[in-house]
Image (spheres, rainbow, N blue to C red):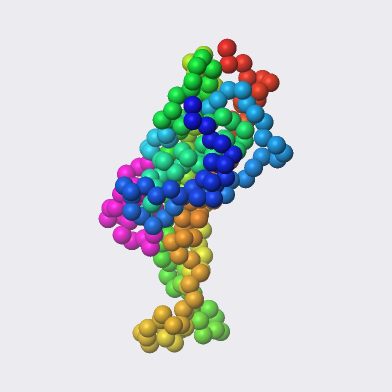
Amino acid sequence: MKNLSLKFVVTVIATLAIIITSCSGPHVIGYSIDPLDGLPIKYAAPVLVRNFADKRPVRERFTSDETEDFDFYSLDKHFKIPVDKSITKAFQIELANAGFEVADAGNFIIGEKPYIRISGEILHFNVIRKKLPDTPQYGKKTLWKRQQFTVLVTIKIKVINAKARKLIMEHTYTSNDSFDMRSEMIDVKAYTEGKLLEKSRWQSTDNYYSVQLLNDHLKHVLFLARQDIVNLLSPVELKLSE
């Protein structure tokens, strides 16, 4: 069985973006994983994490007429690593960081040792950034451009006692938000006179901010799932033979 060693965990936390040649997008899914309080517990049962199934709606994955009205839309082509692989790897590291012996779907549990099998479904992993009407600032010579952000991350997690062939947990985790914010401050006179604005603008949001929103909501979802699994698979309470 291929384990996630401490060195491996540290390496991947720092560089969660491993380049996969089949994708060419510039954006990377990944975040710093928060450790549990105190030393991690060493669990007796190893965990096999299958690659999460990508069940997102088509409109969240591929270009359509609907996406042309947005400044940013988190399509598959925008990511350097496929979404399912990135999220699966992040969750493996979450569990390894909590003290589990973790194997990925390409490896097998050696011998007769009982193990836990975890699978997931990515139901939503999407952020949209859309322009809003310009907003003049009263009494000032500036004008703010505004954008609307909508983000939704939903993942279903299943935990199975492989030896007993028993489903011991199934839960859907969701994190979402929708808000407006200022994105650019520009000179009103230059704007009204139709002049070039490149030297008279200040930009506060970009594509990186959109991807960071996704990472933050993914972190919240996977952290909650990790907490539930840690509580469920207590070394004292879990009886794999049942």
Asked if residue 70 lies in the magenta stretch, the reply is: yes
Asked if 7 appears above or below 192 in the picture, the reply is above
Residue at the limit of the structure toward the front, as seen here: 7
Asked if residue 142 lies in the magenta stretch, the reply is: no
Quadrant containing the C terminus in the rendered view: top right
Can residue 203 be seen from the camera position used here? yes
214 left or right of 55 in image = right
Residue 94: x percent and y percent? Answer: 56, 39
Residue 129: x percent and y percent? Answer: 42, 60
Residue 108: x percent and y percent? Answer: 45, 24
Residue at the limit of the structure toward the left, as seen here: 65
Give the extent of the magenta segment.
56-77
- Identify the residue at image location x=44%, y=87%: 189
- Identify the residue at image location x=27%, y=55%: 65
Residue at the limit of the structure toward the right, as seen here: 38
Q: Quadrant of residue 114?
A: top right
- Identify the residue at image location x=67%, y=35%: 40
Asked if 187 appears above or below 214 in the picture, the reply is below
Asked if 8 appears above or below 116 in the picture, the reply is below
Can residue 171 be seen from the camera position used here? no
Residue 207: x percent and y percent? Answer: 43, 61
How many numbered marks, from 0 up? 0
222 left or right of 34 in image = left
Foreground of the two, 114 or 148? 114
- Identify the residue at image location x=29%, y=53%: 63
